[in-house]
């Protein structure tokens, strides 16, 4: 098979599922579910194939593909041609995110088999469209294409929340769309300015042009553009205080969508900040490093303290996501290899951990119709397996060594301790608070006396074991052998850090 | 020794097997765990003997690469590690055996062995780690094992609270270790112990930095070893099953803090301030915990406070530069305290789960084996001559005298008096007099699987001290410091009167306890009556928990609510403001398009009028 077409097949394979679903009758519940799960598999296999291909020592550049797509110029023939190409590519960082996306998407589809109770056809069509959008975001090699895929993720998510969510689903969906639309608008302006000034949106080209001393963009404009990027992706990540939309989404969206949302969609913010913010504007990023570190510590602490007093487990997890994204910011702000690697590890690790946690939340909600901590006390008696996995997920979340969360946290903190030790020291309060809120919530739900009789409560069963086992194994794998992530990252990080001069 | 890395893996295999098929094996799970730890024990003994004659062995491989930094993992068998391997695998094996009887009939029997396997794996991994990061990793994992086992009776609210408290309090300490470790890395560019010592000795690290990192790492040890002010989780940890208390909260994990300080001893030696801090905290904890132990009525809690106190003793020894003394006492304490806990478990087992010593008594006649064994433990811990505790305590006191802390030395002596007192109080209340509980008929001696481990430990509690005595030679001490003169001499030379004073104090404590609880010639409320307030304070453990509840817990809650206020009112308020401005503008726009022709006409006329006025005022066309 031609290596160049693999990425395109990978990205667009879920769309084939939409076509197939179009011919399936609405009432055919089983077939809809089957098709939905099956068509996440090609992307999974292809992404894993690329990963092992890479481990075998092959070059990732072989996979990049470029086709000319749109070209235009002004009336004057002398004016340069503006061209937007269809170009997909992959480096180690992108590869990890693509694998993460493919894994979580498949597991989320399996989750949806259990959690989605109506209109499976529409759900899976939107879901597959969303997967294409996410895969495209992580493989796009120019900003326009990135933006298009980025928008493609918004629309299906909006409908998935608004239609299949819980009681206040419409409100959550609108707030999701408004905030993210706001972020997109800023992003679009940044892209257009860059395009107009440089004549290209290719990320590699932009990196080179901006690094060139004779580049056409003034320093203050660059700083302005970076701050705009920080806001645009800050909404997505989210950075405190741009976070209130994601609380609603976490609580109201169906668990299988939150697995994707918390596991992958939030990570687009981190990906954008590292690849575009740090990658294209390294000088300016250095100037903002302290600010970003402060924002990171703020996120970490605010999230952790707020998670400590929530009564709804979903809210605990939502604030916990904010808190963990603070660690990503801290790692980035360290501006050294250790910190940035920690940030990327955290992105992957949190993707897996939050997917696991929300899957379990889905399981619990399905059985008990509640996710409030006090209503769930003593679950370990009736559902020992689910309680055990919940505890394992909680331990991963609080950064227990031997699991992925620790390696990430450790590197992010280690990086920041090198550059901003005092700030990092303040951040360590977050480590304690994380333990406090995770244990308060998890033990509150599983330990102690059962507060009420749960009728018809049964433990994990059948297909539900696939997501929990796969996720737990991956989390432990990364925790015990972190080189599974660090070796692909090596060269990708070098490229980013060359710009930082260290 | 090349295969020493296998030692932790046997319990890990047991953990995995039982995790997968423990449910099916039911009580046969015990055999898997016992076998695994037995193999570990055999390997450990072989490694220990090899280490007597061969030099230190270490091996490492690349674990994580960050740019040019290569972080390694591996294992090392030096004297301290070899000794710890032996202690941990021995106690673990004995506790695995003991639990077979103790946990018999428990619904989650196999789960118990799963957790035990996990803990043993982590503890053995901890003591062969050649670098700080790996130590930290296993350090946290033993914490997990401890957490799981404390919370084993998860349906009990007390167990839940105790497990949570243990995890969070030790984590506060761990953060100190975490920071210290990272700071040390950036100073020395390595997590390896050997590299760190090299850099410290070469003077590459500034004095302030050494003190700072040493104290931060010590904070980790404070959390793990239940030193003041992070001690209060340990007595609560007694909510776990008693074999767990023997293994984790007496012999092994809580000693990990002492081990850590010992493993990093060259770093601590480089900072006088750090050593003094350790000595003060250790000595204070020793007497502080012992004083609480005087009045507690729960058999396990008395032992728990005794553990805290004894760990303080070890820390005090290390802080007085008594490396050998600290490690020696760690070893003897592991034997006699594990013995005491197992014997206490046997007592609790015998009286049907009751732990209140006021409801025991007269058990000497019924428990023909447990009684004498408990007495051996009591004599050993009290420092009565000829038993193991006597030699190690003597070594500590000599080291302290040599270290030149006369006040701390005095505190340690008083603590020794307290120790003898509360231990004999326990012994007399449990084993002599009349039985004060119900159901005397059911009191029975424990099965062989429980008494066998106690007998082994009982023998060790007697003879364990003879490896390092002032009379027959300090074999252990000489071996421990062999090839590393920096650690100090193999034996602390103290004046003879120290030995006499120590003996006097411990015998005095025992005698006093006998007067009150054994012979009853002195009324029991003679003390509590006299110092009523003091007694209440001691009974309430100096109100430390209440103090934390009112300060730290309340403050974190307060901060949380402050953030919530910001989140709900400021952030959401700002969002509301923005949306309402936009909504207002929209409403305004909507109002303008009312569809009423009259309004439109009026507005048009008004506009025209304004234009005319401007036109008139400017006197002609606008220029």
Image (cartoon, rainbow, N blue to C red):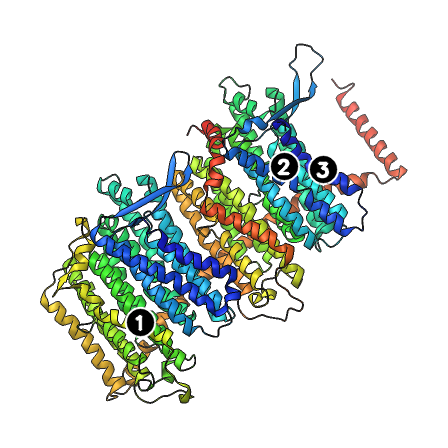
Report the residue at 45% width, 29% height from top: A500
Query: Residue A135 bears which disc, if any?
Result: 2
Q: Quadrant of residue A152?
A: top right
- For disc 3, the marked residue is A15
- The disc placed on residue B339 is 1
Taking the spot 46% from the left edge, 33% from the top edge, the residue there is A490
Q: Residue A458, image x and y in percent?
A: 64, 64
Relative to B65, residue B503 above or below: below
The crowd level at tag 2 (other Cα within 10 Å; few <14, some 14-19, many 20+) is many
- Answer left or right for A403 relative to B412: right
Dot 2: what SS? Answer: helix
Task: Provide the chain ID for the residue under circle 3.
Answer: A
Instruction: Specify the quadrant that holds the C terminus of chain A.
Output: top left
In the rendering, at what x and y percent does residue B347 appear?
36, 79
Q: Along the line of sight, which residue is nearer the eye, B259 or A165?
A: B259
Query: In the orientation shown, which residue stands out farthest toward the top?
Result: A78
Q: Looking at this view, is B505 or A170 the one in front?
A: B505
Q: Do labels 3 and 2 touch, CB within 8 Å?
A: no
Disc 2 + disc 1, Cβ < 8 Å: no
- Would you say residue B45 is visible in this rendering? yes
Nearer the observer, disc 3 or disc 2?
Answer: 3
| Label 1 to label 3: alpha-carbon separation | 68 Å
Q: Which mark is residue A344?
A: none
**CA gap, disc 2 and disc 1:** 61 Å
In the image, are marks 1 and 3 on the same chain?
no
Earlier in the chain: of badge 3 and badge 2, it is 3
């Amino acid at each position: 098979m031609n290596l160049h077409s693999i990425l395109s097949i990978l990205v667009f394979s879920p769309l084939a599922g939409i076509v197939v679903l179009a011919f399936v009758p609405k009432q055919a519940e089983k077939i809809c579910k089957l098709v939905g799960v099956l068509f996440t598999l090609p992307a999974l296999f292809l992404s894993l194939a690329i990963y092992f291909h890479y481990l075998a020592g092959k070059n990732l550049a072989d996979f990049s593909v470029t086709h000319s797509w749109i070209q235009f110029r002004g009336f004057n023939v002398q004016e340069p041609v503006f061209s937007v190409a269809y170009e997909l590519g992959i480096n180690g960082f992108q590869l990890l995110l693509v694998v993460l996306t493919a894994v979580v998407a498949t597991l989320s589809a399996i989750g949806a088999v259990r959690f989605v109770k109506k209109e499976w056809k529409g759900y899976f069509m939107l879901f597959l469209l969303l997967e294409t959008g996410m895969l495209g975001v992580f493989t796009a090699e120019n900003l326009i294409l990135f933006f298009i895929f980025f928008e493609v993720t918004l629309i299906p998510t909006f409908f998935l929340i608004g239609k299949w969510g819980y009681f206040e689903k419409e409100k959550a969906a609108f707030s999701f769309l408004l905030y993210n639309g706001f972020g997109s608008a800023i992003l679009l302006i940044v892209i257009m300015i860059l395009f107009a000034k440089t004549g290209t949106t290719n990320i590699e080209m932009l990196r080179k042009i901006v690094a060139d001393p004779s580049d056409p963009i003034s320093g203050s404009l660059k700083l302005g553009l970076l701050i705009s990027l920080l806001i645009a992706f800050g909404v997505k990540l989210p950075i405190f205080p741009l976070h209130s939309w994601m609380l609603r989404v976490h609580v109201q969206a169906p668990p299988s969508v939150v697995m994707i949302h918390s596991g992958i969609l939030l990570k687009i913010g981190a990906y954008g900040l590292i690849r575009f913010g740090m990658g294209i504007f390294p000088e300016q990023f250095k100037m903002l490093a302290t600010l970003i570190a402060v924002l990171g510590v703020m996120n970490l602490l605010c999230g952790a303290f707020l998670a400590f007093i929530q009564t709804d487990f979903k809210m605990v997890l939502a604030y916990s996501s904010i808190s963990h994204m603070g660690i990503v910011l801290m790692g980035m702000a360290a501006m050294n290899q250790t910190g940035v690697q920690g940030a990327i590890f955290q992105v992957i690790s949190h993707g897996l951990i939050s997917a696991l946690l929300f899957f379990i939340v889905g399981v619990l909600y399905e059985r008990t119709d509640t996710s409030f901590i006090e209503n769930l006390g003593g679950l370990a008696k009736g559902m020992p397996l689910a309680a055990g996995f919940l505890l394992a997920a909680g331990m991963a979340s609080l950064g227990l060594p031997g699991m992925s969360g620790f390696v990430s946290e450790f590197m992010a903190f280690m990086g920041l301790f090198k550059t901003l030790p005092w700030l990092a020291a303040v951040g360590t309060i977050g480590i304690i608070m994380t333990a406090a809120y995770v244990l308060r919530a998890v033990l509150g739900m599983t330990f102690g006396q059962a507060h009420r009789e749960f009728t018809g409560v049964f433990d994990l069963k059948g297909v539900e074991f696939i997501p929990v086992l796969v996720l737990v194994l991956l989390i432990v794998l990364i925790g015990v052998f972190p080189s599974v992530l660090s070796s692909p990252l090596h060269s990708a990080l070098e490229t980013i850090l060359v710009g930082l001069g260290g | 020794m090349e295969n020493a890395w296998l030692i932790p893996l046997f319990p890990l295999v047991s953990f995995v097997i039982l995790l997968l098929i423990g449910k099916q094996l039911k009580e046969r799970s015990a055999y898997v765990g016992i076998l695994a730890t037995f193999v570990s024990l055999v390997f450990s003994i072989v490694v220990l003997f090899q280490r007597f004659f061969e030099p230190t062995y270490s091996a490492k491989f690349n674990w994580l690469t960050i740019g040019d930094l290569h972080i390694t993992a591996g294992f090392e068998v030096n004297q301290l590690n070899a000794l710890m391997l032996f202690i941990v695998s021995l106690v673990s094996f004995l506790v695995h055996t003991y639990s077979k009887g103790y946990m018999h009939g428990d619904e989650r029997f196999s789960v118990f062995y799963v957790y035990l396997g996990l803990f043993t794996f982590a503890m053995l991994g901890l003591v062969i780690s050649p670098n700080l990061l790996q130590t930290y990793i296993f350090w946290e994992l033993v914490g997990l094992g401890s957490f799981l086992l404390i919370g084993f009776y998860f349906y009990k609210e007390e167990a839940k609270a105790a497990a949570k408290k243990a995890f969070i309090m030790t984590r506060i300490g761990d953060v100190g270790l975490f920071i210290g470790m990272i700071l040390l890395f950036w100073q020395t560019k390595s997590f390896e112990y050997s590299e760190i010592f090299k850099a410290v000795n070469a003077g590459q690290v500034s004095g302030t930095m050494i003190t700072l990192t040493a104290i931060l790492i010590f904070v980790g040890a404070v959390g793990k070893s239940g030193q003041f002010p992070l001690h209060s989780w340990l007595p609560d940890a007694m909510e776990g099953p008693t074999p767990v208390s023997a293994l984790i909260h007496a012999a092994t994990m809580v000693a990990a803090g002492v081990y850590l300080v010992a493993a990093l001893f060259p770093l601590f030696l480089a900072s006088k301030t750090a050593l003094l801090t350790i000595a003060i905290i250790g000595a204070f904890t020793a007497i502080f915990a012992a004083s609480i132990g005087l009045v507690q009525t729960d058999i396990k809690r008395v032992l728990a406070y005794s553990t805290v106190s004894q760990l303080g003793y070890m820390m005090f020894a290390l802080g007085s530069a008594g490396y050998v003394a600290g490690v020696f006492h760690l070893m003897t304490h592991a034997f006699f305290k594990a013995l005491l806990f197992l014997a206490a478990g046997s007592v609790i087992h015998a009286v049907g789960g009751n732990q209140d010593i006021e409801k025991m008594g007269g058990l000497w006649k019924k428990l023909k084996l447990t009684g004498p064994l408990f007495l051996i433990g009591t004599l050993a811990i009290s420092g009565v001559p000829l038993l193991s505790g006597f030699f190690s305590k003597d070594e500590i006191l000599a080291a302290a005298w040599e270290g030149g802390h006369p006040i701390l030395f005095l505190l340690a002596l008083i603590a020794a008096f307290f120790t003898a007192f509360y231990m004999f109080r326990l012994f007399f209340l449990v084993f002599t007099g009349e039985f004060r509980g119900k159901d005397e008929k059911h009191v029975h001696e424990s099965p062989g699987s429980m008494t066998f481990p106690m007998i082994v430990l009982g023998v060790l509690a007697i003879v364990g001290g003879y490896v390092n005595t002032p009379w027959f030679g300090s074999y252990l001490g000489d071996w421990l410091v062999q090839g590393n003169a920096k650690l100090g001499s193999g034996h602390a030379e103290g004046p003879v009167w120290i030995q006499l004073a120590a003996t006097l104090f411990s015998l005095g404590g025992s005698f006093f306890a006998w007067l009150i609880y054994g012979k009853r010639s002195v009324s029991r409320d003679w003390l509590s009556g006299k110092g009523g307030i003091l007694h209440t304070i001691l009974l309430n453990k100096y109100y430390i928990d209440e103090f934390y509840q009112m300060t730290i817990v309340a403050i974190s809650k307060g901060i949380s609510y402050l953030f919530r206020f910001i989140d709900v009112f400021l952030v959401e308020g700002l969002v509301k403001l923005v949306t309402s401005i936009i909504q207002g503008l929209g409403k305004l726009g909507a109002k303008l398009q009312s569809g009423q022709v009259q309004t439109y006409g009026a507005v048009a006329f008004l506009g025209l009028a304004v234009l005319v006025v401007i036109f008139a005022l400017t006197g002609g066309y606008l220029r």
